[in-house]
Amino acid sequence: SIDLAKLGMTHVIAMGAVGHDELGNFVINTMRNYGIDTSNLVRKENVQTSATMLPIRPNGDRPALHVPGANHHLEFEDLDLDVIKAADLLHLGGTGLMSALDDGGSLRVLQFAKEHGVTTTFDLVAIPRPDLRDLVEPLLPYIDYFMPGLEEAKMICGKDDRKEVINYFLDRGVGTVVFKMGEHGSIVANKTIGEIIIPAFKASAVVDSTGCGDSYCAGFIVGLTKGWSLEQAARLGSACGALVVTGLGSDAGIVDLDSTIHFMESAELLE
């Protein structure tokens, strides 16, 4: 949400759960400082705000030590459906890490959004678990833009060939797949355009890859809202990822839309 706000989206609404703790205060206050509407963040009793510790390695990798916290207790009933109905776009992230919402709630949210003409985008952190495919597959017919990493997509469907992975999700109702591949770029594919491979941009330094995928989603979403082609939207997403990797934190390197577009138009591509 912060990346969206930095990129100039003027009405970003955050939905989720935090605890009654200082970390929850920090999350809310930080979002508010960027003009994000936090009125739909619910406070959960007797549970801490979700948190992740990331020991950053010299090459930018970051194994995650995660406490699900309040996110595990976010329920469908916590969501304001009138807000969703009035939205242009709904982005759902965190499936697999929100046990209460994963128990049918995410499906109801996406179904409701599609019934009311809201564009849906989807990302997740895929963690190996025996029910991962069963968790994600019912959601697919209600997702316009399915945006995990390619390796996560392979984990979900159990296939390794890229074209087979693409077809697996398109055949199950996804409108467009957008697979992130790190330094190898990204793939955008649907049944109309076929498959487009978007090269990655060369970053000035590789410091911390935290949030690169999230920032890609933000850039892609901004491109969609501006009516850009899917290829141009993906290029903006790639530019966001290349900027974020240059500093510590999930929004490092992104200043505003103009500077991000300038980077997109001038940066060197990775071969």
Image (tube, rainbow, N blue to C red):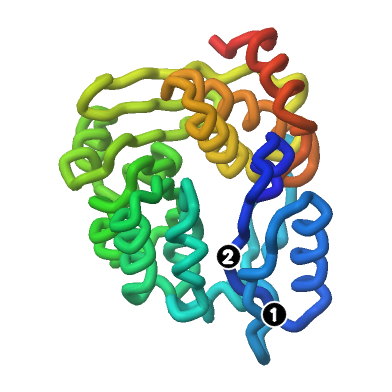
Q: What residue is rendered at 43% in x and 46% in y? A: 121
Q: Nearer the viewer, residue 79 or 60?
A: 79
Residue found at x 72% / y 61%: 53
Residue of label 1: 19
Asked whether residue 184 is in view, the answer is no
Q: Residues within 10 Å of mark 1 (few under 14, many from 20)?
A: many
In the rendered view, would you say 38 is above or below 158? below
Q: Along the line of sight, which residue is nearer the eye, 192 or 40?
A: 40
Give above or below for 108 relative to 266: below
Question: Based on the displayed image, in which of its 4 quarters is residue 186 positioned?
Answer: top left
- Dot 1 and dot 2 residues touching (CB under 8 Å): no
Q: Amino acid at mark 2?
A: Met
At horizontal 71% and vertical 55% (from top left) the residue drawn is 36
Regarding residue 15, the answer to whether it shows in the image is yes
Residue 88's spot in the image, x, y percent? Answer: 47, 47
The residue shown at (45%, 69%) is 81
The mark tally for this picture is 2
Residue situated in front as seen by the camera: 27 or 64: 27
Residue on which the image places disc 2:
15
In the figure, is residue 143 to the left or right of 179?
A: left
Q: In the picture, residue 193 is in which quadrant? A: top left
Residue 155 at x, y percent in the picture: 34, 49
The kind of residue on which mark 1 rests is: Gly
- In this rendering, would 177 be left or right of 87? left
Q: Residue furthest bottom?
A: 46
**Residues at marks 1 and 2, CA–CA distance in whole angstroms:** 14 Å
Q: Which one is nearer the viewer's eye here, 4 or 10? A: 10
Q: Compared to 111, does 2 lie above or below? A: above
Q: Position of residue 69 (x, y in %)?
A: 62, 77
